[in-house]
Amino acid sequence: MSDLVKCIAEVPPGQQAIRAKCFHPTGTFEQFPKEEIEQSIPQRFEKIVQRYPNRIAVKMGDHEGTYDELNKAANRIAHAILKERGDGSEPVALLFEHGMDVIAAILGVLKAGKFCVALDCSCAPERIEYILDDSQATLLVTNTRGSIVANQLRLSSRQLLNFEALDHSPSVANPGLAISPEAIAYLIYTSGSTGKPKGVVQNHVNLLQEIMAYTNAFHITTEDRMSLLASCGSGQGMMNAFSALLNGAGLFPFDVRAEGVVRLIQYLLRERITLYHSSASLFRYLIQAIDTERFPDLRVIRLASQQVLKEDVESYKQHFSPGCVLVNALSSTETGTFRWYFMNKETSLSEDRVPVGSALEDKDVMVLDDEQHSVRLNDVGEIAVRSRYISLGYWQKPELTLTKFLPDRCGGGARIYLTGDLGKMLPGGLLIHLGRKDHQVKIRGYRVELGEVERVLLAHPQVKEVGVVPWVRELDEKDLVAYIVARRAPAPTISELRGFLKKKIAGLYVACGVHISGNFAADQRQSRP
């Protein structure tokens, strides 16, 4: 590990120029100073409440609440939790639908000096029960709707606290607890290699550092109106919620699963959303549903979670106003965002893969080989993040933590997280993301990157979504199988797709024998595709 070198930290001039124009029209931006991350999330929030008590904090549909109202609701929850559980850090589970109530509950848990385990009512009961057991949360905070779901679960001896059933006796004053910036703030459960979710531990200072970076890069102001499409049980949801609430901006939750993409368009226009954040796939569905709308208020589109393609950039150029900036971000639950790439209408891409960008403050990125030595520029390796502001590790999984979080031999308090993602560093410090490390397979002696096959098939004009997986036959012989979702009927024929793929990557196709199917479930019932 002695030869680990960090990437070029300077932001390229072209990126600086785009960022310099990424301002709200009011121009009222205030810098988020570095010293502000050395506190707890409730401390920062309560300062914002003092400054902007009557501004809209959260609005969903016809329901809205000011910063003062949100703070009082959170304080009532905090005092009720303290009455039941007393002082001291411990996990508190939250079971809510997407919306305003979960925001107040998260703040209430943090104000009580506890840490959150946010659950989604729409999740499968088995997943909710597993997370409750694994997190060891003995208190479950919910509302009336969540209580209906909770009554169908195996809760053992857990205590249920319905905050809608609280009387008005709990105080609405700030609890005023002294909470360390290093204290645990929340657990986020992600998919695990064993098939069971694993809890990622984050503290207050790590989230505040990410909010600082997001605020200062996008120049978030009190006039901004931010989307919240992701669940608060995800790292994306937590970051989006607090990027608004720790800056005095408006937060506008929207349930895409319940409302649909057409209403998402109406929501963006009606609520005059200025900062939009979603996965690349949801953005593609949004593009397909757009008619003539131009979204004059939207100034930042931030895409993450999935690889952004050149056609996504072209769609952005076609449908959004000249003042709107597109950002391709790379992040993980364990690290938060560690790379982003800013684009405007003049951005030109030389290849189909959109860069994930240049360095962020406090987060160095390296590309490592299997022995964890830095590779040369343009060589492929595993992406690793070196920072003081990464997850504390995996909840109750010390062995897994030790394999993924490495000490930094250079000292200084930083650690190194092995992301499991493949990438290559270009001259000048731009990073190209090449998919998951475990998506690289060897078939008949050839090392194949599944993401490459997916990218070529996605370039077909009739293909909307694609997934490529290895199919193991007898004697451990493997083929690649591609599962296709067509953009419209009639779907392209299998022979047409095979011919298209063969022209693009003939050598890989011949070596691997790519089979193409439109029915994953049916193929799973057969001995081979």
Image (cartoon, grey):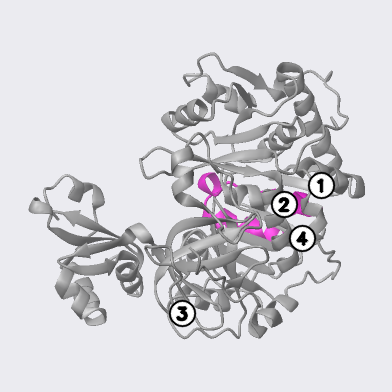
Q: Earlier in the sequence, mark 1 or mark 3?
A: 1
Q: Earlier in the sequence, mark 1 or mark 2?
A: 1
Report which residue position mark 3 lands on.
377
Q: Quadrant of residue 514?
A: bottom left
> 359 or 452: which is nearer to us?
359
Q: Which mark is residue 208?
A: 2
Is residue 130 left or right of 451 when viewed as pictured?
A: right
Mark 3 neighbour class, 10 Å CA radius: few under 14, some 14 to 19, many 20 or more: some
Give me the residue at 51% from left, 27% from top.
Answer: 132
Q: In front of the other: label 1 or label 3? A: 3
Is residue 102 left or right of 444 when viewed as pictured?
A: right
Total labels: the figure holds: 4
In the picture, which quadrant includes the C terminus?
bottom left
Is there any visible trace of residue 487 in the rendered image? no
Whole-angstrom CA distance, mark 1 to mark 3, is 41 Å
Looking at the image, residue 260 lies above or below residue 156: below
Q: Earlier in the sequence, mark 4 or mark 1?
A: 1
Looking at the image, residue 249 lies above or below residue 15: above
Report which residue position mark 4 lands on.
224
Q: In front of the other: label 3 or label 4? A: 3
Q: Position of residue 423 (x, y in %)?
A: 44, 69
Q: In front of the other: label 2 or label 4? A: 2
Q: Which residues are magenta?
A: 243-272
